[in-house]
Structure formats: structure tokens, C-alpha cells
């Protein structure tokens, strides 16, 4: 199953309630929430209070992507805010395993993210401890960047490693995904597709989501 996860970073921040409803009505599965601290990444976005305020407005799966240093400090806050999935970056903390276990203890789905510059070997030891891997297809920090095709080698490596070890995990891709690039990602093994600009900046988000699903179906995983 392919899950479409529009990133709120590309929404009109002066109208978040309406924006979230607009993409839910358009057929999104998840709401991808990019939390940035101005330290792990150069940009600052929003935090738990914004997510908490939106929680009562939406039944979408809240997919919280933490681009913050030492995320373990804030896991309780994001759980309380209503996260369904919490993703931490392998580069952001000394003890990723501790953070992942803390997320799972709260009965929230745990995921680990990897930036383009980090070798895939860094995350392979965690695959049995996560529900999802997030392979960044741009350098984290900003929306609207161009997709980096070389990152798909990591998607393939994670998919292969998971299959060999009989692990059923989702693989999410994030950054520069649109109707041009989704087919490459699904062929490589991704099944959770984040798209900020492509969906939120469109006046017809339903048409974009439908088209993305159609292209994904035409480009299934090739082992
Ligand atoms: C980048 C964020 C992405 C970003 C995606 O650091 O993690 O979620 O908002 O935006 P687009 O789809 O516009 O590249
Ligand atoms: Zn993201």
C-alpha cells in the first residue's frame, strides 16, 4: 500500500486549520510534520504546540519528522501533542536506540531517518527496532529542493536488508517528490511518500494525489 504524506511545511501558515482539511479532503493518508530547531538544520519551523492544536482538527495519521538535536528530550512532548509516528535522525543523537525505544514505550510508531551524506550502514543496525525508515531524498532543512536520485540506492539497500531479515517496515522518502519522481522512489522500494510543495502549492491537490498514486501503481517495487 502506498501512503501519501503531504508536508505541512509547504502549507499557508496563516490558515493551518483550513490547509489541513484541504489536503485530508484531497485524499492524503498522513500529515507529515517537519519540526526544525535551527541547530540540527539551519531552519526553524514549528513545535509540539502547533501539532497539538491541529490534533483536534484532523484524523490523519500525524507523521512527525524531528530534525532536532537530542530528540529524546522532547519525545514526551510530541507524544502528548498527538504524534502517531515519530522519526528521529540517526545523525542527531548519541543513542538512537534509546530514543527509538522511548518512542515505542509510548505506543507510538518509531522511525529512523538518514540524511543524504550519511552512509546507509549507519541505520541498518536499527531496522529491527523501527516501524519505518525515512530516507531523505534532499538535504534536510528546507522544502522545495530538487530530488537527489542517488539517495535511492539507500532505499534499495534498506528494502533488501529488511526482506533478508524478514522485517516488515515501511520506507518513507522525503524531499523533491512529485509526479516526476514518485515512480523512481516506488520502484526502489519506498511506500510512504512525503510531498510538500507538489501537493500544498497546488490548487488541485486531489488531482496531484490521484496522479501520484496512479504513477506509483505503474511503478511497483522491482527487486
Ligand atoms: C525537508 C523536509 C521535507 C520537505 C519536503 O527538510 O523534511 O519534508 O518539507 O518538501 P518538498 O516536497 O517541497 O521537497
Ligand atoms: Zn520531512
Image (cartoon, rainbow, N blue to C red):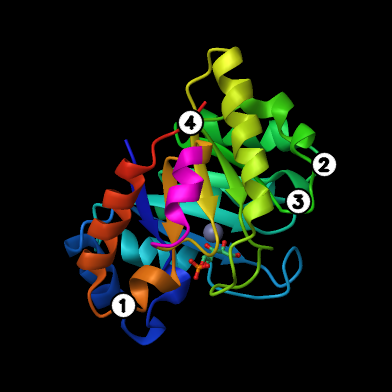
Query: Which disc is residue 139 wearing?
Result: none
- The label nearer to you, 4 versus 2, is 4
Give the distance between the C-alpha atoms of the residues marked 3 and 2, in whole angstroms. 7 Å
Q: Nearer the viewer, residue 191 or 73?
A: 191
Upstream in the sequence, badge 1 or badge 4? 1
| Closer to viewer: mark 1 or mark 2 | 1
What residue is disc 3 on? 92
Nearest to viewer (mark 1 / mark 4): 4
Q: Inspect the magenta stretch and tell me whether residue 84 lies in it.
A: no
Residue under the point 55% across and 18% down: 163
Mark 4 touching mark 3, by CB under 8 A?
A: no
- Mark nearer the N terminus (3 vs 1): 3
Stretch of the chain drawn in magenta: 179-187
What is the crowding at mark 2: few (fewer than 14 residues within 10 Å), some, or many (at least 20)?
few
Whole-number angstrom distance, CA of label 1 to CA of label 4: 30 Å
Q: Does residue 191 appear to the left or right of 188 in the view shown?
A: left
Name the residue beneath numbered marker 4: 222
Image check: 158 left or right of 23? right
- Location of residue 67 in the rendering, given as x and y in whole percent from the top left corner: 65, 59
Residue 143, by quadrant, is bottom right
Mark 4 / mark 2, whichever is N-terminal: 2
Given the current orientation, which residue lies at the most extreme bottom position? 14
Amino acid at each position: 500500500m502506498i501512503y501519501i504524506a503531504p508536508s505541512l511545511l509547504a502549507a499557508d501558515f496563516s490558515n493551518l486549520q483550513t490547509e489541513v482539511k484541504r489536503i485530508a479532503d484531497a485524499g492524503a493518508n498522513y500529515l507529515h510534520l517537519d519540526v526544525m530547531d535551527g541547530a540540527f538544520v539551519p531552519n526553524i519551523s514549528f513545535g509540539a504546540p502547533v501539532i497539538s492544536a491541529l490534533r483536534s482538527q484532523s484524523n490523519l495519521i500525524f507523521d512527525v519528522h524531528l530534525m532536532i538535536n537530542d530528540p529524546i528530550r522532547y519525545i514526551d512532548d510530541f507524544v502528548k501533542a498527538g504524534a502517531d509516528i515519530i522519526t528521529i535522525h540517526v545523525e542527531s543523537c548519541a543513542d538512537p536506540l534509546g530514543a527509538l525505544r522511548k518512542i515505542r514505550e509510548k505506543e507510538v510508531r518509531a522511525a529512523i531517518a538518514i540524511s543524504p551524506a550519511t552512509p546507509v550502514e549507519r541505520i541498518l543496525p536499527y531496522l529491527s527496532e523501527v516501524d519505518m525508515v525515512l530516507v531523505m531524498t534532499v538535504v534536510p532543512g528546507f522544502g522545495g529542493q530538487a530530488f537527489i536520485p542517488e539517495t535511492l540506492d539507500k532505499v534499495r539497500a534498506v528494502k533488501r536488508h529488511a526482506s533478508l531479515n524478514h522485517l516488515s517496515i515501511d520506507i518513507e522518502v522525503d524531499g523533491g517528490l512529485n509526479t516526476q519522481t514518485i515512480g523512481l522512489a516506488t520502484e526502489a522500494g519506498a511506500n510512504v511518500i512525503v510531498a510538500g510543495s507538489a501537493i500544498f502549492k497546488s490548487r488541485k491537490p486531489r488531482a496531484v494525489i490521484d496522479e501520484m498514486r496512479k504513477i506509483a501503481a505503474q511503478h511497483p517495487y522491482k527487486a
